[in-house]
Image (spheres, grey):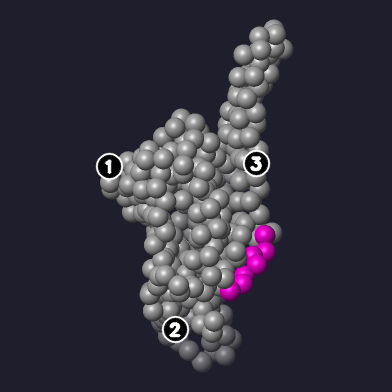
Amino acid sequence: MTINSRLVAFLLASTVCLVTVAFLSVLDTAEPKELVLVGCLSFASVFLLSYVAFEFLIFREIKNLTEAIDKINRKGFKGQVSERLASSPSTNPLRLVRNEIEAYAGRKQKEIDELKKLEIFRREFIADVSHELKTPLFAAQGFVLTLLDGAVDDEAVRYKFLKKAAKSLDGLSMLIQDLLTLGQIESGDITMHFEDLDLTALARDIFDQLEAKAKKRGSEMVLLAPPGQPLWVHADYTRLGQVLTNLLGNAIKYGKEEGRVTLELLPQPGRVTVRVSDDGPGIAKEHLKRIFERFYRVEKSRSRQQGGSGLGLAIVKHILEKHQAPISVSSELGQGTTFTFDLPLVDGH
Ligand code: ADP
C-alpha cells in the first residue's frame, strides 16, 4: 500500500471524527442524529483540509523532489536552474530544498562539463605533443641509422646526412623550448619583468636579429615609427621581444619570397598600435580563427619545412595576455596578413 495524501487525510479525518463522536457520546449531550451529523461534518472538513494541505504542500513537492533527483541520476543536470529559480521564488521549505538541490546539481554539472572538456583537451594535447616530438626524432634516428648501416663510408653522404640529422634535432630542441615556455607562461611560473622601455629601440634590436633570416628569403624589412621620438611602454623586454620575433619571423617565413615585411608603431592618444604585416599569400578565413591554437598549422608540411613548431602564435597570444594586450589578425588571400595589438604608453619620460 502506498502512502499518499488521500490515505493520510482519510486516516486523520477518521481519527478526528471518531474522537469527536466518542467525546460527545461520553458527555451524552447530543442526539444520535446530531452525532452522525457532527461525525460526517468533522470527517469531511478534516479530510478536505488535510488532503489539500498534504497534496499541495508536501506530497507534490516531495514528488517534484524525487523527480528532480531521478533526472539528475539518469542524465546529469542540464536544467536552466537560475531562470527557473528566479521565476519561482518560494517560502515552502520543501520547494526551497528542491531549488537548493537543483542549484547544487547545476553547479556540479558545470564543473563536470568543464572537467570533461579539460580531459579532452589534455588527451589531444598529449597526442599532439607525442606526434610533434616523434616527427623530428624519427627523422634524426633514420639518418643516423643509415649512416651506421654503411653510408658513413661515403664522405659526401656522411656530411649531408649528419647535417640533416642536426637540423631535425635543432627542430626538436626548438619545440621543447617552446613547449617549456608555453607551459611556464600558462602556469604562471614565469614572472614577467615589467619595466619602462622604448618600443622603437626594442623593434630595432629585433630587426637586427632577423636581418640574416630576411636576407635569406630576400625580404625587405620596413620599420615605420615616429622618427626621433621614443615610445615608452611598460612591458617585459625579453617577452615582448619574443612576440615581435615570432610575428616578424612568421611574416618572413610565410610571406612571399622577396616580399615586404612591415612593423608599424603608430602612436595614438595614450597608447601605441603595433602592426606587423606582410604581402604574402594570406590566411583563409576558416584557418584564421584557429591559428593561435597550439600546433595549429595552415599548411602542415610547409610550416614544418620552415622549421615552425606550431607554437609561435600560441606563445605570442599568451605573452600579450599577460600585458593585457589582446592580439587580432586580419588577412586577405593573395594580399597578405596583418597582426595588430595595442600597448598603453607610459608618461613621465
Ligand atoms: P609555426 O611555429 O609553425 O610557424 P605559428 O603558431 O607561429 O606556428 O603559426 C601557426 C600557423 O599560422 C603557421 O603554421 C602558418 O601556417 C600560419 N601563419 C602564421 N603567420 C602567418 C603569416 N604571416 N602568413 C601566413 N600564414 C601564417
Image quadrant in which you'd find residue 280: top left
Give the residue pinned by disc 2: 38
Of the residues under marks 3 and 2, which one precedes in the sequence? Answer: 2
Name the residue rendered at 32%, 50% in the picture. Answer: 331
| Left or right side of 285 for 95 | right
Question: At label 2, which amino acid type do we have?
Answer: Val
- Residue that label 3 marks: 176
Q: Nearer the viewer, mark 3 or mark 2?
A: 3
Disc number for residue 334: 1
Kindly report the distance in space between the C-alpha atoms of the residues bearing marks 2 and 1: 97 Å
Residue drawn 55% across and 58% down? 205
Label whose residue precedes the other's in the sequence (2 or 1): 2
- 287 and 37: which is toward the camera: 287
Please tell me which residue lies in front, 31 or 275: 275
Please, what is the three-letter code of the amino acid marked with disc 3? Ile
Q: CA distance from mark 1 to mark 3?
A: 33 Å
What percent of the width, then of the height, locates residue 343? 47, 70
- Mark 1 belongs to which amino acid? Gly
On screen, residue 262 versus residue 232, left or right, reads: left
Query: Residue 166: in sight, yes or no?
Result: yes
Dot 3, how many residues are within 10 Å of its Cα: few (below 14), some (14-19), or many (20+)? some
Q: Give the secondary structure at mark 2.
A: helix
Residue depth check, mark 1 versus mark 3: number of the one nearer the observer: 1
Please report the bounds of the magenta region as a residue range: 190-196
